[in-house]
Amino acid sequence: MSDGTAPIALTNEEIARYSRHLILPEVGIEGQTRLKNSSVLCIGTGGLGSPLLLYLAAAGVGRIGIVDFDVVDASNLQRQVIHGTANIGERKVISARNRIHDVNPHVVVDIYEEALTSENALRIAAGYDVVVDGTDNFPTRYLVNDVCVLLGKPNVYGSIFKFEGQASVFNYQGGPNYRDLYAEPPPPGLVPSCAEGGVLGVLPGIIGTIQATETLKILLGVGTTLSGRLLLFDALAMTFRELKLRSDPDRKPIERLIDYDQFCGVPRPRSGAREEHPGMDGNFRRMTVSEVAERRAAGWSPFVLDVRGAPEAAIVRFDWSDALIPHTEVPARLAEIPRDREILVHCKLGGRSAQAAAVLAAAGYDAVNMEGGITAWAQQIDPSMPRY
């Protein structure tokens, strides 16, 4: 055990359960006992966390911690296989814990229904042998990395987008960490989320299972891990390739946790400016869907610009939309947008449209961003519209 206490032996029932492990010379009784007395912390119970948690539990890892503050939504079920239709609306950590116990009642499950932050991360991660990153955003990835460096924990990394995935092992046996791969985060909005760009449902199953494999190898002390290597997977081509990673000798040492939202450029509400100019953000305005609906009912007729992609618009769109221009194309297609009307910009959730509104405002347009996007409209104004 990581705390130095005597290991707990396998029971007869566990010997029967793990028999296919026990006959492997690389595992055996000793290795399976090591798994039983090991602990893993998984950040996230989504696409990557689902297969990871199921296979770690099935393999007999004795204690598993899960961190997540979200609830199960119907849109999760296309890839987050640890949850089911009956769990919609349930807290993910509860849904995951119940499913883990169904797979293997011998596993102790610790749940942390909270966002991982600089204030709680060291406390949560300190008691685990390995930390597995199943997150989908850059602030948390950097936070997980820095926590693992400060605590001396291996960090099993995975990420997914559309049809492509990555996996590696960071901070293991003197190997490189996440900051050796990405010293600085990309500009905000440059890399869309899976909610914006989409993801093939089986992709997180493949990458998450690779993460589970690397975790078990670390706990067992067998094989060659992905430390010092970045594994790249292309599902469309069905190819794997890898890049070599080395520690950057010029990288600044990690000495403390920081404000990771600020580091990654995640915008925050600003006090003062918003009160002085209500609804303003830089040079464009923000409106809730309720405000937009009220103003349209009163006769407001802006130019409505949908900045989603064509596949999204094929699912659902406003019949009062004037143009469909993906947000990345707006700077090059300004000539298609009139300058003599207010421009109401929307996307799915409001993030891409805010970027487009900022571009329009900088070009001299009177731009308004619809907060929450077409999803908020479907939730609050017109429930008959499909949501995706």
Image (spheres, rainbow, N blue to C red):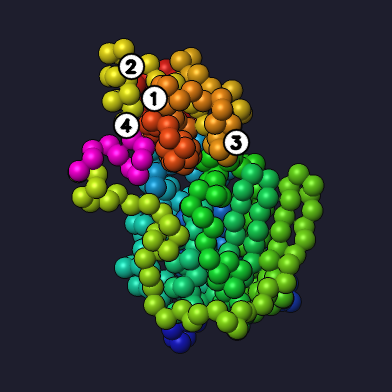
Badge 3 marks a residue whose secondary structure is helix
Q: Amino acid at mark 4?
A: Met
Residue at mark 1? 342
Around disc 1, counting alpha carbons within 10 Å, would you say few (fewer than 14), some (14 to 19), or many (20 or more)? some
For the residues labelled 3 and 4, the Cα–Cα distance comes to 25 Å
For the residues labelled 3 and 1, the Cα–Cα distance comes to 19 Å
Residue at mark 2? 300
Badge 1 marks a residue whose secondary structure is loop
Residue 93 placed where, x, y %?
A: 41, 52
Residue 129 placed where, x, y %?
A: 50, 75
Around disc 3, counting alpha carbons within 10 Å, would you say few (fewer than 14), some (14 to 19), or many (20 or more)? few
Q: Amino acid at mark 3?
A: Ala
Between 314 and 385, the residue placed more toward the observer is 314
Residue at mark 3? 332
Q: Earlier in the sequence, mark 3 or mark 2?
A: 2
Q: Residue at x 41, y 21 (%)?
A: 341
Q: Is residue 277 magenta?
A: yes
Q: Amino acid at mark 1?
A: Glu
* Residue 4 to residue 76: above or below: below
Q: Earlier in the sequence, mark 3 or mark 1?
A: 3
Range covered by the magenta-colored residues: 276-286
